Amino acid sequence: MDFKPLEKADKAVFDQFYRSRYYENAHFNFTNLYMWRQPYQIRWCVEDDVLYMLSEWDGVLSALQPIGPQEKMQEAIGKFLDYFAAQGKNLNFVGIEKSFAEDLRSYPDAAFEILEDRINFDYVYLAENLIKLAGRKFHSKKNHLNSFRKNHPDAEYLSITKDIIPQCREELNRWYELRRDSEDADNFMCYEVAAIHEVFDNFEDFKLRGAAIRLGGQVIAFTFGEQLNEDTAVIHVEKASPEINGAYAAINQFFVENDWAHMTYINREEDMGIEGLRKAKESYKPVKLIEKFTAVRRKS
């Protein structure tokens, strides 16, 4: 297996594979892989109509879920076993969906220990709920949104284009400066900011949808995402000024209403085990969580 680093020119290949089946994992799209390709050292190859990927973090080599026809998954597991054995390493998988966990459980020539990866479960919402915010369970969210509208009647909702990307970059940098010295700051924050800037460099090529709220000539919130599968959109990034009350509630609702009302579900990705982020994601009442798993080959 001849693995190579992920590059921008590889998008068409990945899009073809991810669209060939119904995947719900928010990471199963080119944009997410490209954003995190450097810290996780993403490499890939294609053999016999199956997409194989590797990642490496803190010196640990891991396999990602192979992408391809269901009937080739058992063979794909065998190829990964052979590759890791040739490297002198024990095969382990990260970020796999439930269906592939079942493939591993049924693999006849090796046994795997499979564990839930709760901090990476995706939160999925009904688009209609995020738009209407109807009922008692969304009462506080509706209040935040109404307060923003009342206090900022001059706020502009804009689609992200190359003309306003510089203002989005400025807001991103302000967002980072407010947090860089906080107890929540870590290397991931640095990686994320760099990755978002890189996405802005390639925004039109990646065919993303994005939106911003501008207030007093300054972008105070922005977001972007894309269609993940036939009925779901995934929101990759959402940033807003913490100094503007209701800015997060506004960009969340405005974006879904204006760009994703035709989708059934909105996947807002994982909470990474961050308590405040988990609380925020749960407060929007997800209708389902997309389970993810890790797997390690049991040594005989």
Image (spheres, rainbow, N blue to C red):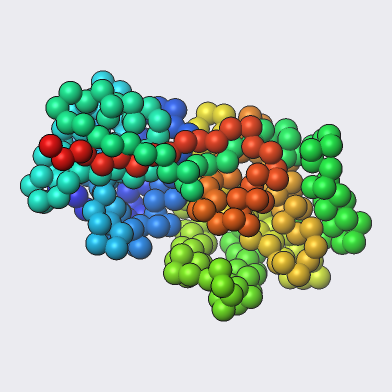
* Quadrant for the C terminus in the image: top left
Rendered residue at 52%/53% (across/down): 273
Q: Nearer the viewer, residue 74 or 266?
A: 74
Q: Position of residue 217 (x, y in %)?
A: 77, 70
Q: Nearer the viewer, residue 282 or 132?
A: 282
The quadrant in which residue 262 appears is top right
Please state if 153 lies on the left or on the right of 245 as rendered.
right
Rendered residue at 59%/37% (across/down): 124
Q: Is residue 103 above or below residue 249?
A: above
Q: Residue furthest top?
A: 71
Q: Is residue 192 above or below residue 144?
A: below
Q: Is residue 153 above or below residue 206?
A: below
Residue 119 visible at all: yes
Total number of numbered discs in the rendering? 0
Residue 226 visible at all: no
Q: Position of residue 32 (x, y in %)?
A: 44, 50
Q: Is residue 104 above or below residue 146?
A: above
Please state if 79 lies on the left or on the right of 263 as rendered.
left
Rendered residue at 41%/47% (across/down): 30
Rendered residue at 23%/53% (across/down): 61
Q: Nearer the viewer, residue 106 or 165?
A: 106
Q: Nearer the viewer, residue 33 or 274?
A: 274
Q: Position of residue 138 (x, y in %)?
A: 79, 41
Q: Position of residue 110 (x, y in %)?
A: 17, 31
Q: Residue furthest right?
A: 150
Please state if 83 lies on the left or on the right of 59 as rendered.
left
* Quadrant for the N terminus in the image: top left
